[in-house]
Amino acid sequence: MKFENKVVWITGAGSGIGRALALEFARQGADLALSGRRLDRLDEVRVEIEALGRRAVSVPVDVSEDGACVAAVEEICRTLGRLDVAVANAGFAATGPFEKVALADWRRQFDINVIGAVATAQAALPELRRQKGRLVFVASVMGMIALPGQTPYAASKFALRAIGLGLSQELHGSGVSCTTIHPGFVESEIAKVDNRGAFRAERRDQRPPKLIWSADKAARVMVAAIAGRRREFTFTGHGKATAFFGRHFPGLIHFVATRDAVRGRSLKNDKS
């Protein structure tokens, strides 16, 4: 019961990693504040948490809206009395060839993945300082590697990693820890969300199924890293390998990515 009687706030809590984290924190004794844009999804998770014997409140939030996160923290403290852990998990992936991704989609990508995470952190920090709590950014191994067709998403996660590392230095000695988590492939709905942030059930997840961790398994190792106040934590075997090569051998990544692109163009020309 590493988080017994602690209050944890999670954005993007209605599905995927956010939902699994909420349930794992509840199993570890925490009460939960659940944020996201869809109240029906949040309420479903809230009922699951209450079935585990813990308190939970649904606090709908669009993290890209000015003042929304501050209002959420006020509501959390009013209903649950305190805030010990804040998890900035809300995010989505804008994808496509660089020249075809609209500027509006780039702005939306950064408004949610980057500015939304900053807004979450700034709103939570005054309470976290009182409790000597924990701040968490859910980034990605894509914060250490860039691939064709995923530039907006990778750029947002690169930025989030920089924010996490810089903030962990600023918070050193304050009693508040900052953990930046870099998951590899994890079961989620991210592949079913389009560039405008809208859920599309018909979209197919292109990720290799054998490499995808279950959200529950991911949540267990993430909560352990948060409990240990890790500065950075990367997980899944392929995620660790990808992050390693992305950081230390970017030339090799470039070679592999461009070779595949050249091969794809060659095959296309052969067929025509």
Image (cartoon, rainbow, N blue to C red):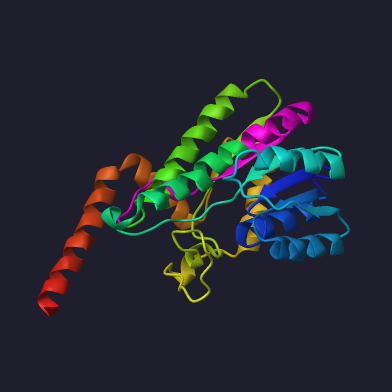
Q: Foreground residue, 166 or 46?
A: 46
Q: Is residue 204 visible?
A: yes
Q: From which residue to which does the magenta span run?
A: 120-148
| Extreme-top residue of the structure | 173
Residue in the picture at 28% in, 50% down: 253
Is residue 7 highlighted in magenta? no
User: Is residue 89 found left or right of 104 in the rendered image?
Assistant: right
Residue 116 x %, y %: 56, 43
Is residue 157 toward the left or the right of residue 51 in the image?
A: left
**Magenta segment: does it hold 147?**
yes
Q: Residue at image x 22%, y 52%?
A: 255
Q: Residue at x 45, y 38 (%)?
A: 159
User: Outermost residue toward the right?
Assistant: 53
Q: Disc count in the image?
A: 0
x, y (%) of residue 233?
55, 43
- 138 shown above or below 84: below
**In the image: residue 136, left or right of residue 266:** right
In this rendering, does residue 230 appear at all? no
Question: In terms of depth relative to the viewer, which is nearer, 61 or 252?
Answer: 61
What is the quadrant of residue 118 in the picture?
A: top right
Q: Residue at x 75, y 66 (%)?
A: 44
**Which quadrant, please, contains the C terminus?**
bottom left
> x%, y% of residue 190?
51, 62
Q: Position of residue 183 (x, y in %)?
A: 52, 52
